[in-house]
Image: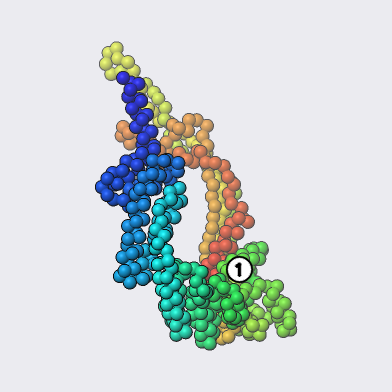
Amino acid sequence: MKKTFFLFLAISLFIACDPTKQYMKQGNQAYLLGDMDAAANYYYNVLLLKPNMLEAKQALQQSGGMVLQNKFSAFNKYVIEKEDEKAIKQYLSCKKYYAKCQSVGVELPWVSMYDPIYEDLKNEFVSAQYDMGLEHMRANRYDQAEAVFTKISEIDSTYKDATVLRLKSILEPLYQHGQKMMELEQYKEAFRDFEKVIKLDRTYKNALNLREEALKKASVGLGVLPVQNQTRMQGFDSRLYQQLIATLVQNKNPFLKVVDRSSLESMLREQSLGMSGMIDPESAAKAGKIIGLKYVLMTAISDLVFEDNGVQSDSLVAYEAYSGQIPGTLPNSLPQTVTRFKKVKYFDQSQKRRLYYRVFYQLVSTQTAQVVASDVISEEMSDEVHYASYQGNVNALYPELPVGKNMPPKPKAFREQFNQVKRNVASREELTQEVCKKISKLIVDDLHIYIEK
């Protein structure tokens, strides 16, 4: 009896894991109901899974042949009704269906007598569409032209230069809009238009040169002065400056031209000027304007505190549970086991480092010598590690005594402090790096609106 059950179960699992049997059954049912489209689709799916299944190939040959015959009947109907575009699409649908069945090894009967009829219809229709597309191009109706040439390409991608004209119908309006933006001195918009044109066709007219011209005129020169250190701590100013330059460059704004300290010094020397003269917004704006900058960024660290409390060790109170016994309350009864608690001490070793900073920045326009953006950024970053240890049974340790008859709670944080994976507290260098990244991002985010103007 058990063998029969397991045999039945195995057969059931085999059928469940072999969907082709189910597909064949559903296909046969659809065939009997006269739904040839559904039947052929089921047989097609069988052959996708089992390409050499003869029964499925024969079934698809019959049902698919009827589907193709119906498609040709619809083509013939459209031809008689002079619905040329519908007839062309229907013929292409026939070809697509024929190729689909062919891909699984089934050759359907093709009605070749319709081929010359299609060719005549196609040539006449495509020729008329081509003339219409050219007319749209001449009238600068590029959207309509693109739609027409796209239609031609879908029917016959090799027809004359329809593909080229379709691309031109996309490129020309972008190119013309870019030229218009150049005339209006909207150089950023012009750059974006020519950039799109070049991505599609690098050789299109004068798009490459115009893009470079637009980029040059749209670029914003930003001189980044060295960070002034108004504190007694050394090194943070240079780290902040390096990170600020890196963040500006990583921003990948095509219109932003970052000029760092070395480039500034070189440009100023050419004008017989020096960095020492750029000490306030007015002098920075004057020097920046002479060397062709639009903005100058001035940054100063006004406050910086680093604290390290070293390794601290504290003795803390907890309660360890243990089992005890009390005499039975009845004569000759066994003693009862109860849970008792004793006050103990465990050790907590900790270390904390903290970095507090205050940075002030000003973005100065060289055209007006005005401070167009400024802010004071005040933040702190810290890291702290704790390691608890106990010589007794840690699992029986509780932070407080019970209330009533219930066991006292043991919070997750209390339990985990005895199982912490040892790690070193973040170093001063690591805290400094994270602080510099945060400051730089805040400043660059603020400057973005002025760069995009």
* Colouring of the image: rainbow
| Residue 219 visible | no
| Crowd tier of the residue under label 1, counting other residues whose Cα lies within 10 Å: few below 14, some 14–19, many 20 or above | some
Residue ID at (42%, 70%): 120
Position above or below: 376 against 330: below
- Give the number of marks: 1
Which sits in the foreground, 119 or 447? 119
Which sits in the foreground, 249 or 386? 249
Residue ID at (53%, 44%): 386
Residue ID at (40%, 67%): 117
Residue sitting farthest toward the top: 332
**x and y percent of residue 260 in the render?**
66, 72
Position above or below: 270 against 444: below
Residue sitting farthest toward the front: 113
* 347 horizontally vs 58: left or right: right
**x and y percent of residue 38 in the render?**
32, 50
Q: Name the residue under label 1.
A: 249
Q: Quadrant of the N terminus?
A: top left
